């Protein structure tokens, strides 16, 4: 069982803060080798142990400021999905390698959707951006990249196939590289030959903890002061922004109904000639809403209400039970989800913002890609302090940028804040916890990657592969 523990830890280490991508296939190969030939009871133990030692370090950030109990509940809940890999016996048959990879992907899909809307953190594909197989991200998405990584790892467990599996990896990577070259040409063709100058405001908080939003006016004033400092700077005078973006929760006081904040934003609009996107909480009769509000330079206001709310963060499922487990649950007011996406336009830019963990969901991310010529994600990482949560989330944003082949602007209250190019590379990044304005001119393009246009194809293909592994030809 020691090897299983090591395998779980290695998979966690393929994500930030360590982030060595090659540890994921090593981990999966070691895990599969332990499952081969094991009886059902032993397989259950192996899968449980592997899941626990993967999710415990990966999700340790969820214990920041709230203690160990919520973290342990989340770890156990996510680990339960790994038990699905214990249902079947595994050996060195080719069909078993395909079945294992397909089942892994289907269980990741289940984690992404269930329960309470799901939590797809820790999908293998999110760790594989530097992998030679990542060329397939714009074609098959995170699902396809996970499948390729897992099947390569499983095949590598058979000594007789190691040379062939390495050849398979090189050949697959070369095909992907060729596809990438052709895609670069298409992206250039679809480029609108236009730029958009964006400034990201990381205003920070006085103290990064759960109580940061108990002083919402201070948080707003920090972002306002950072913006005003930027507007008075030489860089703004030389190359003014077309769009300024504030993070999620930059204004936890309703900026429309709170007179002081409304006045400050109006005054800001007089100083700035472009558009301003502000992450804010709106108060409604039915409850608070997590919103991205676009203040246009012509005085118009547009809104997007977050649809994919974080369970136990923005609303409490099973509230009675949750309040017995943790007194902190009583302090959380249920947010109201939005029902529609929004398409914002600014100068020559078109975008649909994603708020915080909406990045995790393939459906939200790809729908955003279809409507945008660049990506925007606003988030608040203050509640996770100096943990690795922000780094892991920023990595997911990089994957989404490459998957869509569009440049991205990511802004957080405390970091990570920065710009990502259309291949997932970080172009500019603000120092974490610094109060800063980060500017960059980004390129716009309306190219639609295959995965953006065919969102459900990878899951359907993997399901078909899984079912085909049970097909047996009749003899005679």
Image: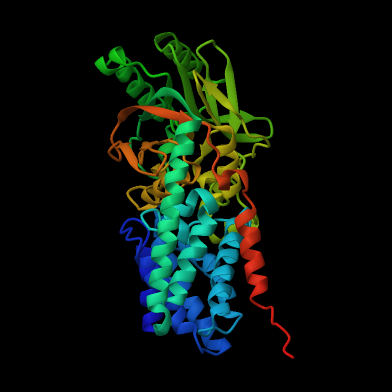
Residue at the far front: name it.
476
Nearer the observer, 279 or 67 = 279
Nearer the observer, 393 or 319 = 393
The vertical placement of 134 against 450, above or below, is below
Identify the residue at horizontal 53%, vertical 76% (top origin): 97
Residue at the far left: name it.
234
Location of the N terminus by quadrant is: bottom left
Identify the residue at horizontal 49%, vertical 46% (top origin): 403
Identify the residue at horizontal 42%, vertical 18% (top origin): 242
State which quadrant residue 369 falls in. Answer: top right
Q: Is residue 433 visible?
A: yes
Q: Position of residue 458 (x, y in %)?
A: 60, 57
The vertical placement of 446 against 329, above or below, is above
Identify the residue at horizontal 47%, vertical 43% (top origin): 183
Location of the C terminus by quadrant is: bottom right
Q: Position of residue 179 (x, y in %)?
A: 46, 50
Nearer the observer, 304 or 421 = 421
């Amino acid at each position: 069982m020691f090897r299983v523990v090591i395998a779980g830890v290695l998979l966690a280490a393929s994500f930030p803060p360590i982030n060595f991508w090659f540890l994921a296939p090593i981990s999966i190969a070691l895990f599969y080798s332990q499952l081969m030939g094991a009886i059902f009871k032993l397989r259950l133990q192996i899968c449980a142990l592997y899941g626990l030692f993967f999710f415990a370090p990966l999700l340790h950030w969820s214990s920041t400021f709230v203690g160990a109990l919520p973290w342990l509940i989340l770890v156990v809940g996510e680990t339960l999905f790994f038990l699905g890999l214990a249902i079947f016996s595994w050996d060195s048959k080719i069909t078993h390698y395909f079945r294992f990879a397909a089942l892994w992907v289907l269980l990741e899909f289940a984690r992404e959707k269930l329960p309470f809307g799901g939590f797809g953190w820790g999908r293998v594909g999110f760790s594989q951006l530097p992998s030679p197989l990542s060329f397939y991200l714009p074609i098959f998405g995170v699902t396809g990249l996970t499948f390729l990584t897992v099947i390569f790892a499983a095949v590598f467990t058979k000594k007789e196939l190691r040379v062939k599996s390495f050849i398979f990896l090189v050949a697959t990577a070369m095909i992907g590289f060729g596809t990438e070259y052709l895609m670069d040409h298409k992206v250039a063709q679809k480029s609108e030959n236009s730029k958009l100058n964006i400034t990201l405001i990381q205003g920070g908080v006085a103290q990064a903890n759960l109580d940061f939003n108990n002083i919402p006016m201070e948080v707003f004033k920090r972002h306002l002061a950072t913006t005003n400092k930027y507007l008075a700077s030489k860089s703004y005078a030389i190359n003014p922004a077309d769009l300024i973006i504030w993070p999620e929760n930059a204004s936890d006081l309703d900026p429309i109904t709170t007179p002081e904040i409304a006045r400050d934003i109006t005054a800001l609009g007089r100083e700035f000639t472009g558009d301003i996107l502000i992450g804010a909480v709106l108060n409604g009769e039915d409850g608070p809403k997590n919103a991205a509000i676009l203040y246009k330079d012509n005085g118009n206001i547009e809104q997007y209400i977050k649809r994919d709310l974080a369970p136990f963060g923005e609303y409490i499922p099973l509230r009675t039970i949750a309040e017995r487990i943790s007194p902190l649950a009583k302090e959380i007011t249920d947010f109201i989800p939005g029902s529609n996406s929004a398409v914002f336009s600014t100068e020559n830019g078109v975008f649909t913002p994603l708020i915080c963990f909406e990045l995790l969901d393939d459906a939200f991310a790809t729908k955003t890609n279809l409507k945008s010529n660049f990506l925007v994600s606003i988030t608040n990482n203050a509640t996770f302090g100096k943990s690795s949560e922000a780094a892991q989330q920023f990595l997911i944003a990089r994957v989404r940028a490459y998957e869509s082949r569009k440049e991205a602007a990511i802004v957080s209250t405390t970091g990570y804040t920065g710009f990502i190019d259309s291949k997932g590379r970080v172009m500019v990044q603000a120092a974490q916890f610094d109060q800063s304005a980060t500017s960059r001119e980004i390129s716009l393009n309306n190219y639609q990657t295959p995965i953006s246009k065919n969102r459900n194809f990878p899951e359907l293909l993997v399901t078909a592969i899984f079912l085909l592994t049970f097909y047996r030809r009749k003899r005679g």
